[in-house]
Image (cartoon, grey):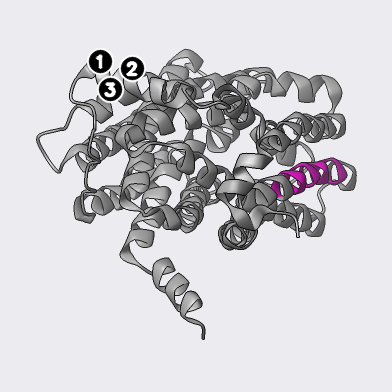
Amino acid sequence: MSSSLVGTLRTVVSSRMWIALSMGFASGLPLLLTGSVLQAWMREEGIDLGTIGLFALVGLPYTLKFLWAPLLDRYTPSFLGRRRGWLLASQVAVMLAIVGLAQVRPGEHPLELGVAALLLTFFSATQDIVIDAYRREALAEEELGLGAALYVNGYRLGMLVASGGGLILADRFSFAWVYLFMACVMLFGVLTTVFAPEPTAAEGAPRTLYEAVVDPFKDYFKRQDALRILLFILLYKIGDTMASHMTTPFYLDIGFSKTEIGTVVKLFGFWATVSGSLLGGILILRLGMYRCLWSFGILQSLSTLGFAFLAEAGDSVPWLAGVITFENLSAGMGTAAYVAFMAHLTNKKFTATQYALLSSLMGVPRVIVASPTGYFAGTLGWEPFFILCAAVAVPGLLLLTQFRPWLVDRHPAAAVV
């Protein structure tokens, strides 16, 4: 076994990677509690598709988190340090918000449901700010690709427990009890935070609120491609995100039961995502960032077309398994490259703020662009809707070609061979 392979294996099984995996789990768990699980609860209570689609707007904190990220760079809680202190506080708040969401009846109090879901996404977005900053500061530059892959796997595991496990449990218990159970599961993230080491703060970290607010943006926007990078981050996964926002109502409408969705889509599809993200992390090391972003983006677009084929096939479990395998494998690879790309762009002096700015744009498709998807699906029908989602991925791929010179220069493996 070569020394480089041994070194890679040691990095994969190191405590730093296990922490990245565990924090990814805590980050992914709350997301679908205001997404597919909440959609299924609302649909069960007779709420129309248009309203379900509009509930994507409760995810606005994920797109606006850069507004309060400077506070997390500037101030340090009196317990556990700058990163772990804020992380523990946000995780406790997430648990309380999930408990609050469990107390609301969607069919009777949709406004209260929206407020409760908005609080959950705010505290979840705050947790994400700190986790992203922690990972960037705790890992070496050469570890960011694998760290992103492990984080994505943990994130997907958290989503799996919340959505796949939540939907299966919802066939046997009320959704309110499911949410209370998920609040208890968040204790895993709390324990990780308590026992993880505090990363060393970079020299030159902001000492005043002015520096925390202004300097990260000045540092980022002095780049020549600053605006085009932001546009690329906005567009790269837009089609994939639009499609995934409406998949749960889609599965239910074409005849799949909640147990079939939870078993095949969530549990079976999880392993495809795990394989995809790990494969993506390895391929980034071998092929470079540019080639991976380009190749994975094409695969993501093609996998979205698979849902259009499933619309024709109907409630066929083998077809569902095949489409989900391809889609999750592609999504895992694409997300690993996407997250690693953003991490490489951040300055460790302003990690929380700069990463929050970049990842906020990553959340725009999930929140704003995804909000009218219920109306699109209802007007166009499922098959044309998914074809549209596949097509809107093209502009992001075309924009990527403009970054080839400096991406290839920074990652020599990305050169065409």
Measured in 3D between alpha carbons, the distance from the residue under mark 2 to the one under mark 3, in whole angstroms, is 6 Å
Q: Residues within 10 Å of mark 3 (few under 14, many from 20)?
A: many
Q: From the viewer's perspective, tell me whether residue 278 is left or right of residue 148.
A: right
Q: Are marks 3 and 1 in contact (CB under 8 Å)?
A: yes
Which amino acid type is marked by label 1? Answer: Tyr
Q: Residues within 10 Å of mark 2 (few under 14, many from 20)?
A: few
Residue at left 44%, top 20%? 64
Q: Nearer the viewer, residue 364 or 370?
A: 364
Residue at left 54%, top 38%? 37
* Mark 1 element type: helix
Percent of width and height locating residue 73: 26, 30
In the displayed structure, would residue 251 be above or below residue 105?
A: below
Measured in 3D between alpha carbons, the distance from the residue under mark 1 to the one under mark 2, in whole angstroms, is 6 Å
The residue under label 3 is 212
Which amino acid type is marked by label 2? Answer: Val
Q: From the viewer's perspective, tell me whether residue 37 is left or right of residue 260.
A: left
Measured in 3D between alpha carbons, the distance from the residue under mark 3 to the one under mark 1, in whole angstroms, is 5 Å
Residue 56: within the magenta?
no
Q: Are marks 1 and 2 in contact (CB under 8 Å)?
A: yes
The residue under label 2 is 214
Q: Are marks 2 and 3 in contact (CB under 8 Å)?
A: yes
Percent of width and height locating residue 137: 32, 46
Percent of width and height locating residue 266: 60, 52
Give the extent of the magenta segment: 296-310
The residue under label 1 is 210
